[in-house]
Amino acid sequence: MKLWIDGHRLTSRRTGVGRVLELLLDEWSATGWPLPRPTLVTQEPVEPRRWFGLDVVSRGSRLPGVIWRHTVLAPLVRPGDLLFCPTNLLPRTLASRRVLFVFDTLLETVPHTFSNRVRARFRGRYRSSARRASLVLVPSQATRRDVVDRLGVDPGRIRVAPLAVDPIFEPDAAARLTPRTHDPVAVPTLLVVGKRSKRRGFESTLAAFAAFREEAPRARLVVVGPGDEPIPSVEGLVAFPHLPDLELAHLYQSAFALIYLSEYEGFGLPIVEAQASGCPVVTSRGGALTETAGDAALFVEPHDADALAQALLRLLRESGLREQLASSGLQNAARFRRDRFAADVARFLRDEAARATT
């Protein structure tokens, strides 16, 4: 049986899903592939020699993702093969065994945060993909419940594989990359990482930042990620649509706190990246966020600007609280190791391959 891997999200400006796949490939290249000589299929060219023992096929770079899956990816996969799609979506017509990673159920859980066009295009496709998959992987117990309740998937076909933090975000690695040059309390940098969307309470973050600056006038707000709306012109605010992991590690290591508000998330990877970097976290309770953050964060409602401002001011006034959250965050992030995550996913893929041959 041959293993095919959907690398559609391995773009030059990859974010969450693409970075998760990149982490898996890095670990499997070092420790062994789930099945011998798998093939990664991408749209954008990648450096094939980076992952020893992996074949790479790159084609169809100008096609929309949905069409690419049906016209490029699907024809490569034969009925006796195994396809791994860490993308929430499967090609429509495929007779092979299919392992799908469902990262969240956003369109089912918070549909009001998406446009009518997005709901019409993707809601049915996500639901159909999850139901047609031979096996569904999810990053959290919360997402597992949502996939059962909202997508109608048999719980016996679901496995939980909590995501992992890349070692580049660990404190020792970050310190070697860029020693801290300033006191994060004297010049506080508040950090927001992830796509700005309706569910993420960005207006509350802006209002809380304005209140925080009254007590810390040198504070900055650094926003990393694309957004549905343009960034407003606000004194002290700096925005980047995308940053490579190395530069993001620099920011986590020197930040005063990460703000990660959301009505719902299937996991919340920036939380554990920040915690692994020794950066305190202020987040909310939507979806899997409490499961991911553990007891190592301050929690506020995603659209409550006053509560967010008070949480940030507590961190400013109570130095012991920042130290406590940094310490407990390191312990919590240690649960999400790359080797463990890659081993879990590899085991589930091998189990599915074995079932197909029995």
Image (cartoon, helix red, strand yellow):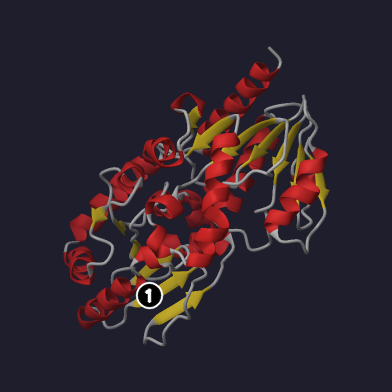
Q: Label 1 amino acid?
A: Leu
Q: Quadrant of the C terminus?
A: top right
User: Position of 149 compared to 117: left or right?
Assistant: left
Foreground pick, 214 / 199: 199
Residue plotted at (47% across, 28% down): 154
Question: Mark 1 Cα within 10 Å, few/some/many (few <14, many 20+)?
Answer: many
Residue placed under numbered mark 1 in the picture = 221
**Residue 117 location (% of width, % of height):** 53, 66
Rendered position, 2 above or below 290: above
Q: Quadrant of the N terminus?
A: top right
Residue closer to the observer: 144 or 125: 125
From the viewer's perspective, is residue 351 above or below residue 108? above
Residue 186: x %, y % from top left: 29, 74
Q: Secondary structure at mark 1?
A: strand
**170 shown above or below 258:** above
Residue ID at (35%, 41%): 332
Residue 98 visible at all: yes
Left or right: where 338 falls relative to 331: right
